[in-house]
Amino acid sequence: MAITRKDTSEFTDINDAFCLTFGYSRDEVIGKTSRALNLFVNDDNWLFTREKLIAGGRIQNRELVMRKKDGSLIHGLFSGDMINSQGEEHFLTVLIDVTEESELRAELTTEQKRLENVIEGTRLGTWEWNIRTGETVFNERWAEMIGYTLEELSPVSIKTWSLLSHPDDLAESDRLLEEHFSGTSEFYEFEGRMKHKDGRWIWVYDRGKVIERDSEGCPVKMYGTHADITEQKKMQEKITELAINDTHGHIAGDIVLKEFANLVASMVRTYDLAGRFGGEEFIIVSPESESAQIARMTERILGKVRDTVFATETDKIRFTFSAGIACSTEVPGNPPIIAELLALADKRLYQAKAEGRDRCKWN
């Protein structure tokens, strides 16, 4: 606390807290001005503070940076009022030292900026979830990952996530959430599928943590991130295929593929064309057919393969397959552009894989 004359700005009284805060003795301050002691880091702040007190008679909790005797800086909340002392106008001022809080805010701002840079650099979607109310906050990348803008998805809630998630994945997500809520797991970690705006399914690595609980230990708020792992999933599939070949041998693999080709040929019409299309992919060309009709035929083949044990000289192998179906009426050209027709079928093949394999996709 300090008292200064209005006309000269000289200190007429200070308390012990002033001396302790700024490092001056009482004798070093009385009769001096703030400017003479160089207390204000910014001279404009001194002028503004003085003019404000003169004009309005009061200042409340103005945050200022001030200088101590040793040159170090303090952040303070400055308040002042006009008083009358012995017939003369004086300023009564108080400074609350908030240096520690200010430094903490600066650290938090720096940390927040660092985190924002990490999120931006890693292309992560972020989410905040009020578990009690269902309210959610997503960043723009969260929406962008599945082909939307936040504006297109608004208003958002936890239902936004559940409606875009693959129905077959929700039970596992719920199980992992319950484990985390109960404290069994430190983090909630889940790999699931979400529907992209263009109709395909992408794989997302979902990771989060409860950051607030109530007095009874029940979860209140949870924060987390989404990462698009679709390409990693595709790579895992290729690695798995290589591992199968390493386990059973390439010769066994070729035998199985030939047996599979024979099975397919036995289940299509005589005027359909079925054959290997490179690697482990096959193609069926079925003229004068509709997509739904071909889908039914493919389902029959899926069921047959599912129930068949393919025997080699050394092993018995079971496997499933996925299929994508495209109709010539879905692509431009008359006759249709074959490359685009194949590309559409290939896209649906990967959609079928993303939805869980052992199925066909035709629309």
Image: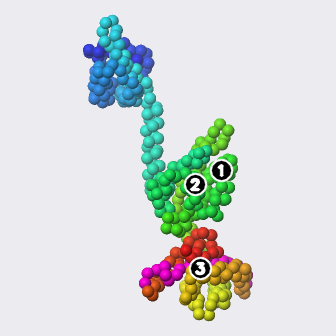
Q: Is mark 2 on a helix, strand or loop?
A: helix
Classified by dominant secondary structure, the portion drawn in magenta counts as loop
Q: Quadrant of the C terminus?
A: bottom right
Q: Residue at x 67, y 78 (%)?
A: 319
Distance CA(mark 2)–CA(mark 3)? 32 Å
Crowding at mark 3 (Cα within 10 Å: few <14, some 14-19, many 20+): few
326 and 4: which one is in front? 326
Distance CA(mark 1)–CA(mark 3)? 43 Å
Please state if 190 lies on the left or on the right of 98 as rendered.
right
Instruction: Give residue 281's quadrant in the image.
Output: bottom right
100 and 61: which one is in front? 61
Between circles 1 and 3, the one closer to the viewer is 3
Three-letter residue code for mark 3: Ala
N-terminal-most mark, 2 or 3: 2
Tell me the residue that label 2 is attached to. Answer: 159
- Residue 86 vs 307, above or below: the answer is above
Three-letter residue code for mark 2: Lys
Q: Is mark 1 on a helix, strand or loop?
A: helix
Magenta residues (range): 314-333
Q: Which residue is drawn at 66% across and 42% down?
A: 218
Crowding at mark 1 (Cα within 10 Å: few <14, some 14-19, many 20+): some
Q: What element carries label 3?
A: helix
N-terminal-most mark, 1 or 3: 1
Tell me the residue that label 3 is attached to. Answer: 292
Three-letter residue code for mark 1: His
Distance CA(mark 2)–CA(mark 1)? 20 Å
Q: Do the residues labelled 2 and 3 touch (CB within 8 Å)?
A: no
